C-alpha cells in the first residue's frame, strides 16, 4: 500500500491525506473532491486526484 499525499499550497510540504491505495488501485480509482485538515499549516485543503501522488508507506504493497 502507499499513502496518498498532496502538497500543501501554503507551506509547500507534503501532507498525508489519510487515504491509502495500492499503486495499481490508484490508477483506476475514482476520487471525488476531498478535503484534508493540513498537518503543516492547520488549514483545510481541497484536492482532487490529479493533485495527489503516492508515497510508499514502507509496508507490503
Ligand atoms: Zn497546508
Image (tube, grey):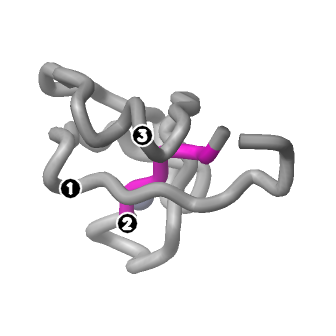
Return the residue nearer the eye: 27 or 47.
27
Magenta stretch bounds: 2-7
Residue found at the far bottom of this picture: 12
| Residue at the spot of label 3 | 24
Quarter-wise, where is residue 22 in the image? Answer: top right
Position of residue 43 measured from the top left corner of the image (x, y, whole percent) = 39, 45
Return the residue nearer the eye: 21 or 32.
21
Position of residue 58 measured from the top left corner of the image (x, y, whole percent) = 83, 56
Q: Does residue 3 sit above or below 9 in this rendering? A: above
Which circle marks residue 51 in the picture? Answer: 1
Q: Nearer the viewer, mark 1 or mark 2?
A: 1
Q: Are marks 1 and 2 in contact (CB under 8 Å)?
A: yes
Q: Nearer the viewer, mark 3 or mark 2?
A: 3
Identify the element where label 2 is drawn: strand
Tell me the residue at 39%/79% (across/down). Answer: 12
Q: Tell me if residue 48 is in the magenta stretch.
A: no
First of labels 1, 3 by sequence position: 3
- Cα gap from disc 3 to disc 2, whole angstroms: 21 Å
Q: Nearer the viewer, mark 1 or mark 3?
A: 3
Which quadrant: the N terminus? top right
First of labels 3, 2 by sequence position: 2
Identify the element where label 3 is drawn: helix
Q: Are marks 1 and 3 in contact (CB under 8 Å)?
A: no
Q: Is residue 26 left or right of residue 18?
A: left
Which circle marks residue 7 in the picture? Answer: 2
Position of residue 53 measured from the top left corner of the image (x, y, whole percent) = 37, 58
- Cα gap from disc 1 to disc 3, whole angstroms: 17 Å
Q: Is residue 54 left or right of residue 48?
A: right
Amino acid at each position: 500500500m502507499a499513502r496518498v499525499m498532496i502538497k500543501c499550497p501554503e507551506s509547500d510540504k507534503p501532507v498525508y491525506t489519510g487515504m491509502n491505495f495500492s499503486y495499481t488501485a490508484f490508477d483506476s480509482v475514482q476520487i471525488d473532491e476531498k478535503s484534508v485538515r493540513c498537518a503543516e499549516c492547520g488549514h483545510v485543503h481541497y484536492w482532487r486526484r490529479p493533485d495527489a501522488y503516492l508515497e510508499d508507506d514502507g509496508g507490503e504493497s
